Amino acid sequence: MSAERDELHRLIEELPEEELPAALAEVRRHLRPVRRVAPWPPAFFNSGRSGTPGVARRVDEILAEGFGES
């Protein structure tokens, strides 16, 4: 973590509760939208949770079918 980010975290912790909404609004003014390149989570997440027993035994077959490829 950079020194500036570390200091920001420390300063936020010191702010009185009643000043948080104004500080949060100010920080939000400085944010830019982040463009997502790919959807998250990838489609292959949880692919092993199908409820079908033997996924570990079928690993070669699953990988051969293109597991995790878009």
Image (cartoon, helix red, strand yellow):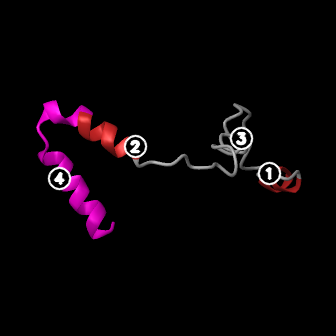
Q: Position of residue 34 (x, y in %)?
A: 56, 49
Prevailing secondary structure of the magenta residues: helix
Residue 17 horizontal side relative to residue 63, left or right: left
Residue 61 magenta-highlighted: no
The residue at the point 71 percent across, 49 percent down is 56
Q: Of the two numbered discs 4 and 1 on the same chain, state the one appearing first in sequence.
A: 4
The residue at the point 30 percent across, 39 percent down is 24
Q: Of the two numbered discs 4 and 3 on the same chain, state the one appearing first in sequence.
A: 4
Q: Amino acid at mark 2?
A: Arg
The residue labelled by disc 1 is: 67
Q: Of the two numbered discs 3 and 2 on the same chain, state the one appearing first in sequence.
A: 2
Which secondary structure, mark 2?
helix
Q: Of the two numbered discs 2 and 4 on the same chain, state the one appearing first in sequence.
A: 4
Q: Of the two numbered discs 1 and 2 on the same chain, state the one appearing first in sequence.
A: 2
Q: Position of residue 35 (x, y in %)?
A: 62, 49
Residue 13 magenta-highlighted: yes
Q: Position of residue 27 (x, y in %)?
A: 34, 45
Measure how far apart labels 3 and 2 are at the Cα level: 39 Å
Residue 20 horizontal side relative to residue 53, left or right: left
The residue labelled by disc 2 is: 29
Write down the region rendered in magenta: 1-21
